[in-house]
């Protein structure tokens, strides 16, 4: 169905946006993509709804409201800029991700992260492009003491589709009381594929991209 066939949905989306509904809420209600919603409502003024903090009639600070509105505008702009992703887009994203986060040691392809999406992209990319031997994939967890190791292992095993028997002995860290940052409940996972050839192929692709960059200065 073309753009014109979505007239009713588009008008309803604009009504909901004027009521301070988020892009995702509108997309879910209308059964359309978030990207379509962002295009339909881009000229509709958006004022975020104040969060219910349980303080009666407490109103959020105007600066906070403006901050939330700016964040939402940036999200809309980003959705319009990105649009849809091609397979090549995802490949280049994976290369950039590895260039920044991956290990540079010559004998293995490895990446550590607390972000499950990044590691899923990495593992999916490895599987799709390099014909890896699944039995040689390994995963190791960095997890603070006191957190549930079995739960974390089951989580990462499911996310990465790597059997728990291929998980190496975890590193159990002692929390530093001087640091106020919250511990990651599922820990940090490191995925390792020991293969010098695969690592060289990955690094060669990164070099091929960077060699084409024509940057000022």
Image: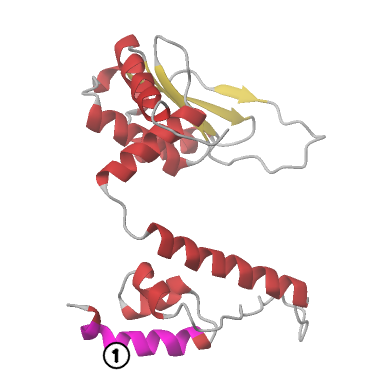
Q: What residue is drawn where x is 53% and y is 37%?
A: 114
Q: What residue is drawn where x is 50% and y is 29%?
A: 101
Q: Is residue 24 above or below residue 120?
A: below
Residue 179 part of the magenta-drawn span? no
Pick the front one: 35 or 173? 35
- Residue 131: x and y in percent read 21, 23
Pick the front one: 188 or 171? 188
Q: Residue furthest right?
A: 178
For the question of whether residue 82 can be seen, the reply is: yes
- Residue 79: x and y in percent read 43, 63
For the question of whether residue 161 can be seen, the reply is: no
Q: What residue is drawn where x is 80% and y is 34%?
A: 177
Tell whether 98 sits left or right of 5: right
Q: Is residue 74 above or below residue 164?
A: below
Q: Which residue is mark 1?
A: 8
Tell whether 148 sits left or right of 108: right
Pick the front one: 127 or 101? 101
Pick the front one: 182 or 172? 182
State which region is magenta. Answer: 4-17
Question: What is the number of callouts on the image?
Answer: 1
Tell whether 8 sits left or right of 21: left
Quadrant housing residue 129: top left
Q: What secondary structure is found at the residue carrying circle 1?
A: helix
Q: Is residue 80 above or below residue 6?
A: above
- Residue 192: x and y in percent read 40, 20
Quadrant housing residue 203: top left
Residue 5 part of the magenta-drawn span? yes
* Picture quarter with the C terminus: top right
SS assignment for the magenta stretch, majority: helix
* Picture quarter with the N terminus: bottom left
Q: Residue furthest left?
A: 1
Q: What residue is drawn where x is 25% and y is 23%?
A: 134
């Amino acid at each position: 169905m073309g753009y014109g066939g979505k007239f009713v949905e588009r008008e309803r989306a604009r009504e909901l946006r004027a009521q301070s509904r988020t892009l995702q809420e509108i997309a879910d209600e209308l059964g359309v993509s978030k990207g379509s919603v962002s295009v339909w409502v881009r000229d509709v003024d958006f004022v975020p709804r104040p969060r219910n903090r349980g303080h009666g009639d407490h109103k959020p600070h105007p600066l906070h409201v403006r901050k939330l509105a700016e964040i939402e505008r940036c999200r809309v702009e980003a959705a319009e800029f990105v649009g849809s992703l091609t397979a090549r887009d995802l490949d280049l994203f994976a290369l950039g991700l590895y260039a920044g986060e991956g290990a540079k040691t010559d004998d293995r392809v490895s990446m550590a992260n607390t972000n499950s999406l990044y590691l899923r992209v990495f593992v999916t990319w490895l599987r799709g492009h390099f014909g890896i031997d699944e039995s040689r994939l390994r995963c190791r967890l960095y997890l603070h003491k006191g957190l549930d190791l079995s739960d974390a292992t089951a989580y990462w095993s499911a996310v990465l589709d790597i059997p728990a028997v291929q998980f190496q002995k975890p590193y159990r860290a002692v929390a530093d009381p001087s640091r106020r940052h919250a511990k990651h409940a599922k820990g940090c996972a490191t995925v390792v594929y020991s293969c010098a050839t695969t690592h060289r192929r990955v690094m060669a692709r990164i070099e091929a991209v960077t060699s084409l960059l024509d940057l000022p200065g």
